[in-house]
Amino acid sequence: MNTDDDGHYDAAVDALAVREYERAGNRYTRGGRRVLADPRPEIDPFEPDQKGWIGQGLQQLLAAAVAYRVAGADGRATQRAVEGIAASRDFETVLQRPGQAACLVEFVADFRVAGGLDGAVETYDAAAERYAAAGDEIDSPQALATTPLFEAGAATIKQIARGQANGEIAIEWEDLHGSDPSRPGEFLAHRARFKRQRLPGLLDRAIADDHLAAPRGTTEYNNERHECPNCGSNHVNWAGTGIVCLRCSTPTESM
């Protein structure tokens, strides 16, 4: 993370590793609120920001809603989604770089899925339309897609998907974005269409599996100093404050 969340993000990941999903949701919530209030010392969240650092706060609220759903705390997931939608809509009046408002609408759709709320399909379609309308004003969609706002918008679906892919990267850049960056609107609109198709099913499976993986951090294969007590793997992932199994996100044991 590049924003100051007072350690709540790492604490949430630590909770995921021990399968305490409601506690993870609580810590993601606290981290998200902290980032939205004070993203970075030089950033006023109610002033235009070319990079969109508040996206990392929205992402933590979204991850909180997902964690609550996996924990079976559906009411809290819905409350967090409503909170995230309100914040995203509010920031639409603040972030003025072409394409940023569309990304915030994309977040609104994600929150609707995570909270079990109606209207996600229509909201994804609205985001795609916003991207298409902004296309002529976007010089480099690749550069825009690597800003904190857009990377935050991609983080949660990637996290959910890797838990269903043996810990590997299940959603690549090419999956999430269009194939032709010379058409910026369509290049970015693909994000919303891809999520519309994939996020509901991925979330349903995470809930059925009772498992939300830790996000992928720094990884190493065949680490002879660590072994997973759950599945026996020695492929590791530095996430949260410790080292977890790349495969199942269980805290590893030193050998």
Image: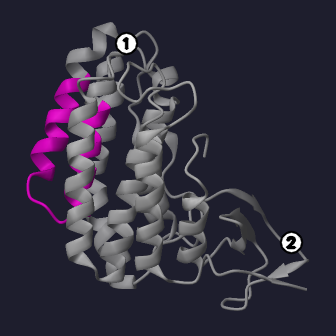
Q: Residue at x 21, y 32 (%)?
A: 128
- In this view, 145 is above or below 248: above
Q: Which residues are magenta?
A: 103-131
The secondary structure making up most of the magenta span is helix
Q: Pointer 2: what residue? A: 223
- In this view, 3 is above or below 248: above
**In the rendered image, is residue 193 in sight?**
no
Amino acid of disc 1: Ile
Instruction: Answer with left or right where residue 161 lies relative to residue 120.
Output: right
Dividing the picture into quadrants, the one containing residue 179 is top left
x and y, in percent, of residue 10 in the image = 61, 62
Q: CA distance from mark 2 to mark 1?
A: 43 Å
x and y, in percent, of residue 186 in the image = 29, 25
Q: Residue at x 41, y 69 (%)?
A: 25
Q: Residue at x 31, y 46 (%)?
A: 194
Residues marked 2 and 1 touching at CB (< 8 Å): no
